[in-house]
Amino acid sequence: MTTATYEAAPPINMQGVLVPQTSVNGDLFMERTNRQVVTERTPTAFSGLGLSDSVALRRSGILARAKLRFTGSLVTAKGTGAIGTTGRWPLDLPKRIRVSANEQSGLINCSGAKLKMRELAHDMTMSDRAVSQLVGGVARTIGTFATPAESWGVGSLATNIADGTYPVELEWSIPICDDETDLAGALFLPTTATDVEIGIDWNDAGTLFTLTNNAAVTLTGNWSIEVVKYSVPEGADGEVIVPDLSMFHQLIENRAADAPANGNNEVRLSGQGPGKTLTRIAFQVWNTVGGVPTPLGMTAANFGPISWLYSTNQEPDRFLDGTDLREWNTHLTSNDLGGVWGFGVHEFAAQNALRDSVDLGTHGEVRINFNVQAGVALTTPRTEVVQELLFHAG
C-alpha cells in the first residue's frame, strides 16, 4: 500500500518577513486584535527652522498610522521692517515628512500640506467646516484644512504682522496604511528585521515668512509622534495571526521638471511599473504674487480643461475647468480641496478602490494634463504632484 505524503506550504514573504501561510487570517485577526494608541516620541524640542528631526519606532505591533504634533510659540519682531507669511505657512512647516521601512526608503515623502490634503480626501468623517482661520486677511470657515484643536498663531498670506508672541498648535496625520479597515499597507513591526523611521525636515524661515529690513521671527516648540498600532494575537498552536500584509502603501511628492505655462501642461508620473496600483493623484500650481509664494486656486478663471491620461492618448477623466474638478472633488470627499490651497485631485479610492483604482501594469505612461488660462500672470511658477500607490511587498 502506498502512503501519501504531504509537504507543509512554504512560508509567505510579507514585507521582507517570512510568515507561515497558516498565520494569514484577516477575519480572525480583526476579531482578536486590539487597537493601541501609543506615544512613540514624547514632546521634544524641535531642532529649528531649516533643520531636521527623526525618531526610530519601537518594534511592536502592526503600525497603521502616525501623527506628528507641534506645540510652540512664534515670536515676531519687525524692527524697522515688516513681517508677513507666505502660502506655505502653516501647513508646510514640515517641508518633508519621511517614512522609511527596511529597504523601502520612500514610503511617505511629502510636505505637511500634502498630508493634510490626503487626510481630508481619504477620510470623509474629517472636516474643516466651521473652523475659522485667516487666509489673506479673510476669515475662512471651509477649505483651510484646519482642525478645531489647532492654532496657526498668525494667518497664512498675512501682511504687516504686529510684534508679539503667538501660540502655535499643529498636527499632521501620517497614513502608514492605505485604509485602517483592512490594514492594507500596514507595517509588521515585531521582528528585529524591521526598522521604521520617521524623519521631519522643517522648512526655513525664508520659505514660510516674508521679512524686510531687520525684521525677524523666532519659532520655538516641541514635536511629538503618536502612533496607532494593532496587537498581534496568537492562535491555538502558538503561531501569530496577521492580516494580509503583502502590500506597501506609498505617498510621494515630486516637483515637475518643467515650470507650468499658460496653455496646456502635461506632467508624467514617476515610478510607474507592474505590481503598482494608483489610488490618488493630486497637484498644486504655485505662483508668486507680489513677491509671495501663493497656491493658484482651483477655479475656472485659473484653469481650463484638466485630465489624466495613459498610453498614447487614452483619457478616462476630463473636467471642463478648475471649478468643475473642484466641485467633483467636493462631491467625492465632502471637503473643499481646491478653494484655498488649490489642490486638484484625481480620486480613484473614495467610492470603490477595488473598482476605480488604476493598475499601472496595464495603464502605462500615466500623466496629468492641465490648462492654465491665458489671463493668469505667472511668475516663477512650479507644479507639485503627489501620487498615492499600493505595491507588492514580497
Image (spheres, rainbow, N blue to C red):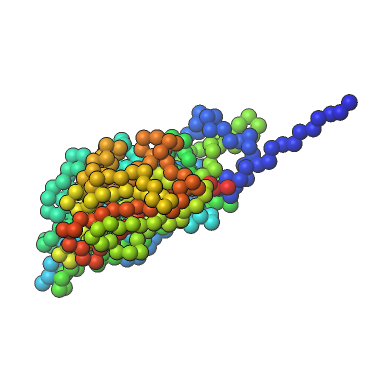
Question: Can you give x and y, in whole percent of width and height, for residue 245 in the image?
Answer: 53, 41
Q: Residue at left 40%, top 35%? A: 352
Q: Residue at left 13%, top 60%? A: 159
Question: Can you give x and y, in whole percent of width and height, for residue 182 in the image?
Answer: 47, 35
Question: Can you give x and y, in whole percent of width and height, for residue 11 in the image?
Answer: 65, 42
Is 206 drawn above or below residue 191 in the view shown? Answer: below
Where, by quadrant of the figure, is residue 323 drawn? top left
Seen from the viewer's position, the closer of residues 137 and 315 is 315
Q: Can residue 38 be seen?
A: no
Quadrant housing the N terminus: top right
Q: Can residue 52 be seen?
A: yes
**Please, which residue is most extreme toward the right here?**
1
Q: Residue at left 11%, top 62%? A: 160
State the count of labels: 0
User: Is 59 left or right of 260, judged from the image as shown?
Assistant: right
User: Is 159 left or right of 13, judged from the image as shown?
Assistant: left
Is 1 drawn above or below residue 238 in the view shown? Answer: above
Seen from the viewer's position, the closer of residues 128 and 54 is 128
Q: Residue at left 58%, top 52%? A: 193
**Please, which residue is most extreme toward the bottom here?**
213
User: Is 307 left or right of 22, judged from the image as shown?
Assistant: left
Is 44 drawn above or below residue 349 in the view shown? Answer: below
Where, by quadrant of the figure, is residue 181 drawn? top left
Seen from the viewer's position, the closer of residues 315 and 343 is 315
